[in-house]
Amino acid sequence: MIAGKVTYVPQRPVVGVLALQGDVREHAALLERAGARALAVRRVSELAEVDGLVLPGGESTTMSRLLDSFALLEPLRHRIRDGLPVFGSCAGMVLLARQVLDGRPDQRQLDALDVVVRRNAFGRQVDSFETELEVAGVEGRVQAVFIRAPWVEKVGHDVQVLATVVDDPLADPAADRIVAVRQGRVFATAFHPELTGDERIHRLFVRTVSEVA
């Protein structure tokens, strides 16, 4: 610090990763690289500390049950309604959707995105694939990893489509399907950006968190 002057150092936003199941460490590492301070969230007290939250890839039905078991479901719904920025990848997209096709009867939704998604739309584990996508707000193409992923079948008027699968033989029959969306402060991808080591999508989310933190 220079004598007589106060140097302002911007504070890093605290971005939680729901740590009940799924790719928690991978998301946390990319959030740190993207300029946030990552915090594992398992309790309501930890949820209260964060400026934004990531719902990782995993198994959406299991995650919804665990949200109930850890008494996080309703507090998380309230925080999202109050404007908490949230990013969900794969299973996280399913949890955020208002409607899920091919879901389980006991599956609970956060109802944070006005979209209809089809669970496991790309098929089983053996049908996993990678392809390159153009994602709105991200410079350059993004390597996208799809593992038992959903896709978006319908979007509401306020939902921005960020990415669709290109017409690629590796991606058949998913060509032109919607795989990344945004509605206000809520983002979701059908693919797993946390598995490639590329933090650009996380930077896009952290920028949004910083604007409201």
Image (cartoon, rainbow, N blue to C red):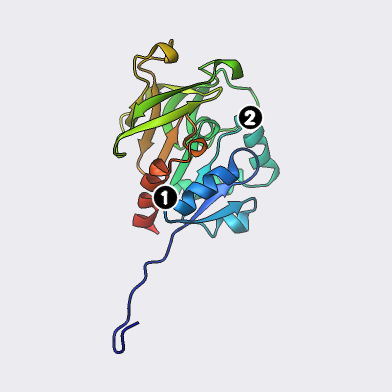
Q: Amino acid at mark 2?
A: Thr
Mark sitting on residue 83: 1
Instruction: Provide residue 41's location: percent of width, then percent of height.
Output: 60, 51
Closer to the N terminus: mark 2 or mark 1? Answer: 2
Q: Amino acid at mark 1?
A: Gly
The residue lying toward the viewer, choosing from 56 and 115, is 56
Q: Image quarter for residue 127?
A: top right
Query: Element under label 2?
Result: helix
Q: Quadrant of the N terminus?
A: bottom left
Mark sitting on residue 61: 2
Looking at the picture, does residue 171 appear above or below residue 136? Answer: above
Please give the name of the residue rendered at 48% of the width and 54% of the height, measured from the top-left corner: 32
Direction front: furthest residue: 197
Q: Residues within 10 Å of mark 2 (few under 14, many from 20)?
A: some
Instruction: Provide residue 185's location: percent of width, then percent of height.
Output: 38, 45
Q: Is residue 18 visible?
A: yes
Looking at the picture, does residue 182 appear above or below residue 10? Answer: above
Direction bottom: furthest residue: 4
Q: Quadrant of the C terminus?
A: bottom left
The residue lying toward the viewer, choosing from 33 and 191, is 33
Q: Residues within 10 Å of mark 1 (few under 14, many from 20)?
A: some
Q: Image quarter for residue 170?
A: top left
The residue lying toward the viewer, choosing from 132 and 73, is 132
